[in-house]
Amino acid sequence: MSIENLKVNDPFADDVGDTQPKNYVHIRIQQRNGRKTLTTVQGLSKEYSPKALLKAFKKEYACNGTIIQDPDMGEVIQLQGDHRTKVMDFLTDKDKSKMGKYALQKDHIKIHGF
């Protein structure tokens, strides 16, 4: 019996090919003090205006928010409260009043937290 055939296929290899998107949109939650939380959205491509998205999020969810400039992650949208699933639904909605033709695919979005 030869051990050479084990080198052919490594099930623990990190290379999965080009099936996975490289640039994800990350939606995270951060705990502030007590029950207060922040929802952060980062990794949006340059074709999306963070200022316009922030305005739409604030209007849709009746919350306050801001855009933070981070040297590593670029522009990060912060919203007060836990809006992770709502933001994902907003970004993937193909309705003309929301994202329309600029809607993202669900496999390009990662939700983190709790």
Image (cartoon, rainbow, N blue to C red):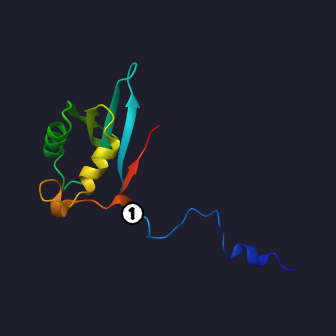
Relative image position of residue 6 (x, y in whole percent): 74, 73
The answer to whether 15 is drawn above or below residue 70 in the figure is below
Relative image position of residue 3 (x, y in whole percent): 81, 75
Residue at which label 1 appears: 21
Are there few (<14), some (14-19), or many (20+) residues within 10 Å of tag 1? few
Q: Is 12 in front, or is 72? A: 12
The answer to whether 75 is drawn above or below residue 109 in the figure is above
The type of residue carrying mark 1 is Pro
Residue in view at x 39 percent, y 63 percent: 21
Q: Residue furthest top?
A: 34
For residue 58, what is the image quadrant?
top left
Q: Is 108 in front, or is 68? A: 108
Q: Residue furthest bottom?
A: 1
The answer to whether 102 is drawn above or below residue 72 in the figure is below
Residue in view at x 68 percent, y 76 percent: 8
Relative image position of residue 74 (x, y in whole percent): 28, 43
Residue 73 seen: no
Q: Is 21 in front, or is 101? A: 101
Residue in view at x 13 percent, y 40 percent: 55
Relative image position of residue 59 (x, y in whole percent): 14, 38
